[in-house]
Amino acid sequence: MSLPDDTQLLYLRLASHYQGAIESGSLTPGDRMPSVRSLTRLHKVSLSTALQACHYLEDKGWLEARPRSGYFVRRPRRVSLQPNSEPEQPLQLDAAQYLGIHERVSEFIASCELYPLKTNLAQAFGSPDAYPTEALKHAATRALRSHPEVLVEPTPWHGESGFRAVLARRALDHGMRLTPDDIVVTHGCTEAVNLALRAVTQAGDTVAVESPCYFGLLQIVQSLGLRSIEIPTSPHTGMSIEALELALQTQPSIRAVVVVPNFQNPLGSVMPDAHKERLVALCAEHGKALIEDDSYSALCDAEQSLRAVQSWDTDGTVIYCASLHKTLAPGMRLGWITGGRWHARIKMLKFAQSRPNDALSQLTVGEFMASSAYDRHMTRLRNLLRERRERTAESIAAHFPAGTRLSMPRGGMLLWVQLPPIRSPHALFEQALREGIRVAPGWIFSNSSRYDNYLRINCGIQFTAEVDAAIERLAALVYEQLV
Amino acid sequence: MSLPDDTQLLYLRLASHYQGAIESGSLTPGDRMPSVRSLTRLHKVSLSTALQACHYLEDKGWLEARPRSGYFVRRPRRVSLQPNSEPEQPLQLDAAQYLGIHERVSEFIASCELYPLKTNLAQAFGSPDAYPTEALKHAATRALRSHPEVLVEPTPWHGESGFRAVLARRALDHGMRLTPDDIVVTHGCTEAVNLALRAVTQAGDTVAVESPCYFGLLQIVQSLGLRSIEIPTSPHTGMSIEALELALQTQPSIRAVVVVPNFQNPLGSVMPDAHKERLVALCAEHGKALIEDDSYSALCDAEQSLRAVQSWDTDGTVIYCASLHKTLAPGMRLGWITGGRWHARIKMLKFAQSRPNDALSQLTVGEFMASSAYDRHMTRLRNLLRERRERTAESIAAHFPAGTRLSMPRGGMLLWVQLPPIRSPHALFEQALREGIRVAPGWIFSNSSRYDNYLRINCGIQFTAEVDAAIERLAALVYEQLV
């Protein structure tokens, strides 16, 4: 590894100087950081070095920028809760499940519609202020001007070429080497996972999934007439490779494994690289398709990107699915897929299922993602989500009863709250709805009753006094239900 | 029935006067029609009555408007070809087919990609000039302005409410009585038909389809693991009700019937109302789902709307699917479905398959379809398609060898050309591709070889000298292949 050049050394030294000051207490939370201009005077560095140092400290979470006021030392956020429990019997597998989740999700949706909503903590994306609303609007307007016939021309096969090129380029950050032709644009990650499962399974087959598992995946599995087998999954390191191995050895009807290796929904777990590598090898060895849902990995607090499982694939075992729904534009439902050795079949299924996507949204997002504005947006989004996640977690720690457990994910917008034993999680959920507070209940994340005692809370929305009050009220309802 | 009021009588009388003049030869093709202003003087009618009469004659095909020059008597287009043959053995059914079409369509696509394209007559929609390009662009820009967060907000469940309301209102024209809640917005008619079939069948079931049949439907059927049974279909009156009845009686594995009652693709046939009514009753009686694909009915030459089969449904037997792809915006892939007694299941499947559609395109089209600009567009489109269809048919009649047959549809943009016996339709198709002329070959419209001797030709594009030359060249290739 080469040493950083002089400029880099300078800004890192400067940053480290101020980091030390904060750690030692010379600067305390809320203190104003010297202005960039005064840093140049004080330390005899260039404006760009001073700025680089501040950006670095902001990225690392030591400073926060306040509009028109400069940088301030950030309140350190410490959450005093125990982390979520590991799976109790990591090697005990349930029977493959066939039915059930539709009913649970339908009941959940029906209950939600019964009461007026005040605070919605049940979704899994940010509020509009987290996304580049104006920039996307302008990009769309420009796309309409530069492609005046885009709404009346045939839609481009497999996706708009410029958009696919930028997706391939951005995928490099996650260790993937793709050409634009390896990519098919889809209606969100949901359609991508549908196509992946349709390509590799037939009705009656079994699919190994994480436990707990995003309810949307369980719905896809059920709607395709498949069974799911839930594999014990650590809230910290993701799906248990040992349990999966056991399942593959004992359940020949398993045709595919579906994982969310980075910031699993709802757990927020991230698979260590060694697990990812082992997972790909295991699936390859057993001849099973490995379907990766990677919608969250770009939302990592740290600057370094998380690697996709696909990046270890050598023989087309992995079908990679992703979306821009969480990171860029919840209103656009853009996703994509690269299908490993099933790519040709996936292209055919996409054509037969819904034809190619409209070009306008692809042109809009393609232009934005090719520019540095996208990088700036992602840095802002990551910081904003970290801030909101930490504030929400602090509020939970402050209000919820002892015995509540919570692991802090290092990215994304979801918190998976493990409640102490309570009498009726269903009654708790209903009462919260009655009071206008909506959360995602644990039981929609499994066909079992293993997660009835859990709530998933979205931290993508602004942390307002109202959200704080909703969490406090939720906590009070938990107290009432304590065993 | 009430008599038309005086104003109506007046414009109809005036129109009938000039229609008589044209029919008797007093006015001949190319003659200029008296100006609207001189009509008011000559006949002592109001400006609006004179205008109404001219519009009426234009709609009926007797006059054509030339920009800034007024109305002219239209060249009557007479096509001297025999109509397409009726099915030879209308009551003989093939065995239900399972496989095959993907390969045919893939080969077709692969062959197309081998040669540079000069004249594309293989598609099934108009060229951009047939659609309201500017108006849609402005509507999209306005939607972005009036809904500034549309790209970053959650997408509306089941579809945008204003758009669904205007779809319900426009469906009245086809005899359907729907509320916006009866409608789910989909990614084109293709996704709608997928959802319909997924709702009512399981892999291994049989679906009755028309013969010939739109290849996209055969692909859906195959990709869902279903079998298709092709029911003899008249080029004039659509699917044979007798043959369908026989199939329903003898093939218990049939779960659903899929029809395009209005301007069937590729035939252009329109089912008489009595057949439509009988079809609904037959499916209801046998407890089979009747899936209606109604993407073309608004493209009828006559002012009067064609009724949807759904309008006869009394017990939820019919699942109605439609799209705006052919009529309004080929670049937007907007479709919709109303699911009869399977509506709840279809809503669930749509959610699990691709989540709700993006709002921007729905807001764009919803605004346009609610205005009279939509009606003006449709009148223009119908006239333009009739004109192009007739010119294309004339060119075919002029150039193709004796024995070529062609039925003239009363709407839409497709011509189904029945060739005289030739040595190798495949060689003909390949040779045409080699010369840059692309048509849809008959064999992708069936799992049988029954239509190898047919071509489907798109008349939605401008009829230029180049198109005329391509048809002449195609005809020369047919001559070379004559048996």
Image (tube, coloured by chain):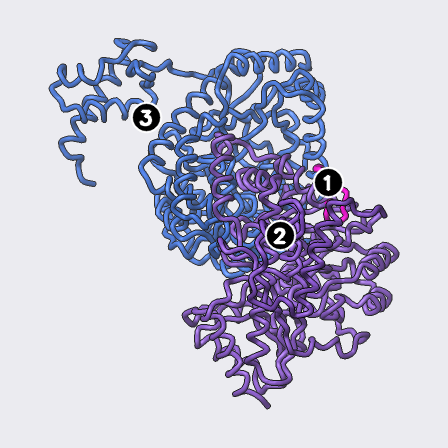
Chain colours: A blue, B purple
Residue with the mark numbered 2? B39
Residue A336 x/y as whole percent: 48, 48
- Residue at left 37%, top 39%? A368
Residue A186 can be seen in this image: yes
2 and 3 marks in contact (CB < 8 Å): no
Residue B191 can be seen in this image: no
3 and 1 marks in contact (CB < 8 Å): no
Work out which quarter of the rendered image holds the N terminus of chain A and state it.
top left
- Residue at left 76%, top 45%? B6
* Left or right, B238 with reference to B80: right
Q: In the rendered structure, which segment of residues is drawn in magenta? A: B172-183
Secondary structure of residue under mark 2: helix
- Tell me the distance, in whole angstroms, between the alpha carbons under discs 2 and 3: 77 Å
Quadrant for residue A16, please give it: top left
| Nearer to us: label 2 or label 3 | 2
- The amino acid beneath tag 2 is Leu
The mark found on residue B194 in the picture is none
The mark found on residue B182 in the picture is 1
Q: Is residue B163 magenta?
A: no
The mark found on residue A59 in the picture is 3
- The amino acid beneath tag 3 is Asp
- Tell me the distance, in whole angstroms, between the alpha carbons under discs 1 and 2: 48 Å
Q: Which chain is mark 3 on?
A: A
Secondary structure of residue under mark 3: helix
Say above or below: A117 vs A131: above
- The amino acid beneath tag 1 is Asp
- Residue at left 43%, top 34%? A137
Quadrant for residue B47, please give it: top right
Q: Residues within 10 Å of mark 2 (few under 14, many from 20)?
A: many
| Nearer to us: label 3 or label 1 | 1
Q: Residue furthest left?
A: A44
